Image: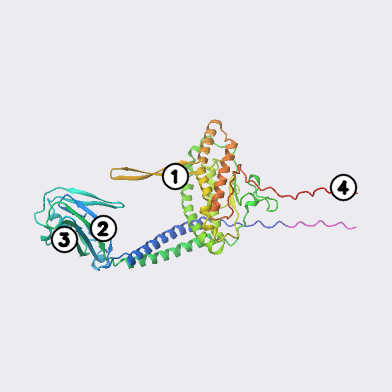
Amino acid sequence: MAAETPATPAPPPPAPTRARWSVGRILLVVFGCIVALLAVALLGAGGTTLWADRTQRDDDGYLTTPTERFETEAYAITSESIDLFEGEEGGEWLVTEGVLGKVRITGESDTGDVFIGIGATEDVDSYLDGVEHDEVRDIDFEPFSVDYRRIPGDRPAEPPGEQGFWAAAASGPGRQSAVWEAESGDWTIVLMNADGSQGVAAEVSAGAKAGFLLWLAIGLLAAGALILAGGVTMIVFGVRRASARATAVPATAVAEGGAVATAGAARPTVYPAAVQGELDPDLSRWLWVVKWLLAIPHYIVLAFLWLAFTVLTVVAFFAILFTGRYPRGIFDFNLGVLRWTWRVGFYSYWALGTDRYPPFSLGEEPDYPATLHIDYPERLSHWLPLVKWLLAIPHLILVGIFIGGWGWGWWGWGDYGGGWGIGIAGLVGILVVIAGLALVFTGRYPPSLFDFTLGLDRWVVRVAAYVSLMRDEYPPFRLDMGPAEPTEPEHTPSPPEAGPPAP
C-alpha cells in the first residue's frame, strides 16, 4: 500500500497593508481646516455686511449709530483728529471717488441752540486755542460712556457760526444735521452751543452713506467661497483613503494586555471603544515633574489637530444627517487624533503610566504601551446627532469632574480691566499627583491607583467617542478599572433539565 503524501499546508494569507497618515496628509487636513475656518469667517463677515447694507439704512440712505448723550461743563466738545488718507498713496481714491459717501452728524440740544461743525484740524485747533473744552478720548457702547480729556482755557472770542473754515456746519434750535462730503485730510468734529456759551449737552448720532459696503460684501462673499473651495479640496485630498485599504482591527479583537486576537476568538468588549494602558514597572521617580515641559511639542501639534478634529466633526455631522454614514477618511483622522491624545495623556498627566516618549503619529502604534481603538460604524442614525449633546449632559458633568476644566473671572481697577482663568483640577489630576508623590517617596506606582485612574480615563474616551458622533451606542455608567478592556461574558446555552428516568 503506497504511503500517502502529506498535504502541503496552504501559505498564510499576505499581511494586510495599512494606510499610514503621512506628515503631508496630516498637514493637508490641518491647513485645510484652518483655511475653511477663515473662509467661514469671511462668508459671515460678507453676509453681515450685505445684511447691514440692505436693511439697516434709514429713509435717507444713511447707516446711523444709536443716539447718545454728550455733555460737558466746558465750552465745546471735540473729537480726536480724524485722518482720512492724507499723504497715503493708494488710499485717496476712497474719498476722491466718493466711495465713502456723505457723512452726517445730527444733534439736538436741551439747553438752547446747538452748533455742529466739521473742520480741518489745524483750523479747529487755532479757533479753540486757549478755549476750555473737552476732547473725546474713548467711547464704550455697552453701556454707553465717554472718556474726555479736559483742555483748560477761557471762553471763545467769537461764536462758532461766525467762522468761515467749516467744511460742514449746522446751527439752530431743535434737531440739526451737518452733512459733509468726505475729503482726504485731518478733520475734527466740534459740538458747541450756537452762542459759544459754557455748558454743552446734546443728543448726538452719526451716519454715513457708505456706497462701498455692497461691493465690500460681494468681495468678502466671493473671497470666502473661493477660499472655502480651496480648504475643502485640501481636506478631501488629506482624508481620502489610500489605494491600499486599511484593515480595521475592531475593538472586539483586543484581548487582555493589549494583544490583538483573532476576531473569532475574542469576546466583545462592553463598549466599541477600547482603551488599553500597560503600566511601566520601571518609572522614574522624578521625570514626571518635568513631563509638562517635555510634552510641549505634542501640545502644540495637538492644538492644531483638535482644531481640525472640531471642523471635521461638523462636516461629519452633516454627512450623517443626510447619508447616515460617517465619512471613513474623516473617521480615521479623528480616531488618529484621539489615539495621539491618549498616548500623550498616558505619558503625562492623565496617567503617568510610562516614561517612553509618545510617537508623533495618528496611527495605531501597537507597540506603544497605550492603545485606543473605536470600531467604525457602518450605519448611524440620521437624527441622533441632533440631540446627542443633550443626551450626553449627565456624562459630560461626570467628565468635568474627572478631568477638570477652567474657571473664569474678571478684575478691574479704575479704567482698566482684564480677564483671567483658574485651572480647576479634576479627579484624574489629583490621582496622578498622588501617584507622582508615591513614586518620589517609594519608587513605585500603586497598582490600585493606576487601575482606578485608567477606569476614569476609559470613561472619558467612551463619552468622547459618543459626543464626537463616532458611535451611536450610549456609554455605560460603569467604571471599568484596570489596564485592559473588560469583555462581555460569553453566553453559553444552559444544559437541558434532567427528565424522568427511563423505565
Q: Specify the principal SS of the magenta part.
A: loop
Of all residues, the one furthest to the left in this rendering is 157
Nearer to me, 94 or 317: 317
Q: What is the C-alpha distance between the residues marked 2 and 4?
A: 101 Å
Tag 4: residue type? Pro
Q: Secondary structure at mark 4?
A: loop
Q: Secondary structure at mark 1?
A: strand
Q: What is the C-alpha distance between the residues marked 2 and 1?
A: 39 Å
Q: Nearer the viewer, mark 1 or mark 4?
A: 4
Q: What is the C-alpha distance between the residues marked 3 and 2?
A: 17 Å
Residue underneath mark 1:
406
**Residue 173 disc label:** 3
Q: Work out whether mark 2 precedes mark 4 in sequence or the reverse, and give the earlier one.
A: 2
Residue 21 appears in the figure:
no
Q: Is residue 5 left or right of residue 223?
A: right
Tag 3: residue type? Pro
Residue, x 49% and y 37% (percent of image)? 289
Q: Work out whether mark 1 precedes mark 4 in sequence or the reverse, and give the earlier one.
A: 1
Q: Work out whether mark 2 precedes mark 1 in sequence or the reverse, and give the earlier one.
A: 2
Q: Nearer the viewer, mark 3 or mark 1?
A: 3
Q: Secondary structure at mark 3?
A: loop
Write down the region rendered in magenta: 1-10
Q: Is residue 247 left or right of residue 386?
A: right
Residue, x 21% and y 59% (percent of image)? 107
Nearer to me, 337 or 46: 46
Q: Are marks 1 and 4 in contact (CB under 8 Å)?
A: no
Q: Nearer the viewer, mark 2 or mark 1?
A: 2
Residue underneath mark 2:
67
